Amino acid sequence: MPKGKKKEKPKDCDTKVLIVFYSHTGSTKVMAKKIAREICADILEIKPAKEVTKSGLKFLWGGAQAVMKKEPELKPLKKDPEDYDVIIIATPVWASNMTPPVRTFLNKHMARKKKVALIAKADGNAGKTIPSMKELLVKCKIIATLELVGNYADKKADFELDIEDFVGTVQEKV
């Protein structure tokens, strides 16, 4: 696509889709925004009331919290997930697990039956992230999953194709 020319939004925006994500470093946020443009979705960035330290120990501390299945308090949500037909939930992977803020969101805001799609973005190993998310969403219908493993800059072409396939699957099932 030529630079400066915006891709048109899908014509069918009747289904209300919300992409919920947590992004500590910004890479999951970039992906969530890209998908939102592709499928005419709103976005909701969840943030813990107290962020994991920004020091050099952030990955160690964050990974430990993920493994221990911590559920930090979240800042108030700016959108109500109940207002949406489909929820796409995106998380970075910490120590082969979903991030603690995403765990909190799943346990506190996803009790009702919804159509849900799941995304795990890992630099190394996605581990048990998607299966663990599914365990917390037993009342929901999982319509699509996507695991992106590796550095986005190194695997951009592959990631773009995977995201395109994911978007197509979500659009088919809504």
Image: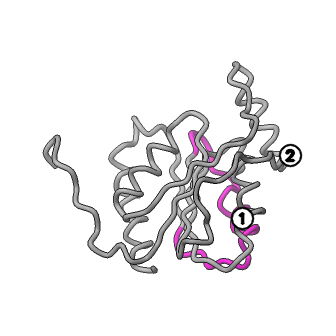
Residue 142: x and y in percent read: 60, 75
Q: Is residue 11 left or right of residue 68?
A: left
Magenta span covers which residues?
Answer: 122-144
In the picture, measured across the screen, residue 3 lies left or right of residue 13, that is left
- Whether label 2 touches label 1, CB < 8 Å: no
User: Considering only order in the chain, which callout, 1 or 2, is on the residue closer to the N terminus?
Assistant: 2
Amino acid type at circle 1 is: His
Amino acid type at image mark 2: Met
The residue sitting at 72% across, 62% down in the picture is: 106
Mark identifier at residue 109:
1
Q: Nearer the viewer, mark 2 or mark 1?
A: 1
Residue at numbered disc 2: 68
Of residue 89 and residue 160, the one placed in the foreground of this image is 89
What is the distance, in whole Å, between disc 2 and disc 1 at their CAs? 20 Å
In magenta segment, residue 161:
no
Q: Farthest right residue?
A: 68
